[in-house]
Image (tube, coloured by chain):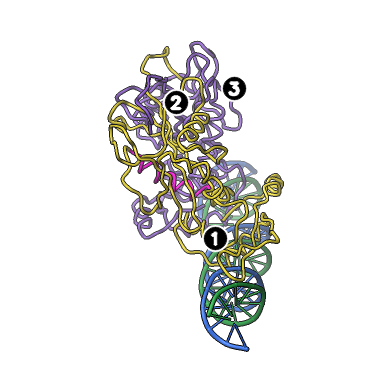
Chain colours: A purple, B yellow, C blue, D green
DNA sequence: ATAATAAATGTAATAAATACATTTATGAAT
DNA sequence: ATTCATAAATGTATTTATTACATTTATTAT
């Protein structure tokens, strides 16, 4: 906290949001093409400025909604980026957030085109400013977070198959996982509700659908349970 | 990034630093007593404002140095705190950093009193603004970080005993650890250099001193080694 | 010489992670 | 109706990591 009186060096505060999605196969990022200078035509994260009357979390939600139409999605602060020349126009500190969205259920919100496009995280275009660093940090946070908290489900439809869940973890962590060991691990946590319906899209036999049991998870949390994959 | 042109809502950007130390027994925090309004007389983290020409990391280093005399210490950004009313005087977003310092080796720098005082993290006084939240987040980050990166050594003297290292981890994680299992675990990583001298302060027999081998750690990192306690 | 103190050390039991192959249900093709 | 193709479902043995736990050793002070 301040040593002397308050000074007058005020600075532009921006927010940038890394939006993750999962398309049943690959981890995706939602980007927009910048249609004004500087860096016009380059791809960018969703960003905007902090207003005087809103908290950082509120601003992040507002900006995400205004640029994509999305709301009620999982969002969390990543960290602040503050290199002096990160924005060539003016000194700007940006607070990065990341969001996890379920592409299928939110697709209609996105459909009325905001000019946003999904990219495979493995094949990103050039990004403006320090957005590449933000993405890198977001991926590593996502790896950590999904391995200690059940937030990966935010990227899946409400009902999903074991294989989809496995593919999600494989995409996030960038490595193959043994099928039987994965199922064993998931079942041992006892957090999913097996549905009676099957998903017939991927095979003739069909595979059972599951649902994450949030209530049960919260109950277990109180008993000292810790999620871990 | 920015949808429309740059706007003029600039905001005060502060930095606050959570300074951790370890006194051979307990995890400590360095605080200063605020001697001006608002909240005069209350304890506070070390804080200051971001200047136009410096990065966040640079500002954190400068502020830490100006308030404590400390330099060349481990420091890392925690995250940004931006509730609208967190500072009653003026809208201020604060970027929190945490630092790990070796109390014994840096004590002389601190001696010319800046009015700072070490507190046991378990017995903190009331803190101004949202500093309590910052501390809480810092502790949880410290727990994570020390369990996956060898940064705990920053809190110890260059030469330390196994018991000191153990007590450090016990203090950080808030639980007792079995002596033999701890030594086994540490030795299995093969990252410490056993010195020939012993520390005779704690017992008649004396206990061997060890030193963290940074070079070896870096070599191992390249081979895919991951630190873990 | 004895007492007191903390340091150093190993093993057995349990739990967790890994490696690995076959059978089953179904729809489509003949 | 039989066969074929496809992905789903499932279990066990091995290895590795974690945990629990008690005695001996070196030294100083008396």
Above or below — where is B9 with respect to B133? above
Q: Which residues are magenta?
A: B130-145
Residue at x-position 53% and y-position 21%: A86
Residue at x-position 35% and y-position 43%: B132
Q: For the residue carrying disc 1, how many other residues have a C-alpha within 10 Å: few (<14), some (14-19), or many (20+)?
A: some
Give the label on residue B166, or none: 1
Question: Where is residue B87, by image quadrant?
Answer: top left
**CA distance for labels 3 and 2:** 30 Å
| Magenta-colored segment: predominant secondary structure | helix
Residue that carries the numbered disc 3 in the rendered image: A126
Residue that carries the numbered disc 2 in the rendered image: B50
**Magenta-colored stretch includes residue B13:** no
Q: Position of residue B74 (x, y in %)?
A: 55, 41
**Magenta-colored stretch includes residue B137:** yes
Horizontal relation, residue A98 to residue A127: left or right: left
Horizontal relation, residue C1 to residue A195: left or right: right
Foreground pick, C21 / C30: C21
Residue A104 visible in the current orientation: no
Q: Position of residue C21 (x, y in %)?
A: 68, 60
Q: Position of residue A99 (x, y in %)?
A: 44, 34
Residue A106 visible in the current orientation: yes
* Comes first in the chain, label 1 or label 2: 2
Check the residue under mark 3 and report the chain it is in: A
Q: Are marks 3 and 2 on the same chain?
A: no
Above or below — where is A28 with respect to D4? above
């Amino acid at each position: 906290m301040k040593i002397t009186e308050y000074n007058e060096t005020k600075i532009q505060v921006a927010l940038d949001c890394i939006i993750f999605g999962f398309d049943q196969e690959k981890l995706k990022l939602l980007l927009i093409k910048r249609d004004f200078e500087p860096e016009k035509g380059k791809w960018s994260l969703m960003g905007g400025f902090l207003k005087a009357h809103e908290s950082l979390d509120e601003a992040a939600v507002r900006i995400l909604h205004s640029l994509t139409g999305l709301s009620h999605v999982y969002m969390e602060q990543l960290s602040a980026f503050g290199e002096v020349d990160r924005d060539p126009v003016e000194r700007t500190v940006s607070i990065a957030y990341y969001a996890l969205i379920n592409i299928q259920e939110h697709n209609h919100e996105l459909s009325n085109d905001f000019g946003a496009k999904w990219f495979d995280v493995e094949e990103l275009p050039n990004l403006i400013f320090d957005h590449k660093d933000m993405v890198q940090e977001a991926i590593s946070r996502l790896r950590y977070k999904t391995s200690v908290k059940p937030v990966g489900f935010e990227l899946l439809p409400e009902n999903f198959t074991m294989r989809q869940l496995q593919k999600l973890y494989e995409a996030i962590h960038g490595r193959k996982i043994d099928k039987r060991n994965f199922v064993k691990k998931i079942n041992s946590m006892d957090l999913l509700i097996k549905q009676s319906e099957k998903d017939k899209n991927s095979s003739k036999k069909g595979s059972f659908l599951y649902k994450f049991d949030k209530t049960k998870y919260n109950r277990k949390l109180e008993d000292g349970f810790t999620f871990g994959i």
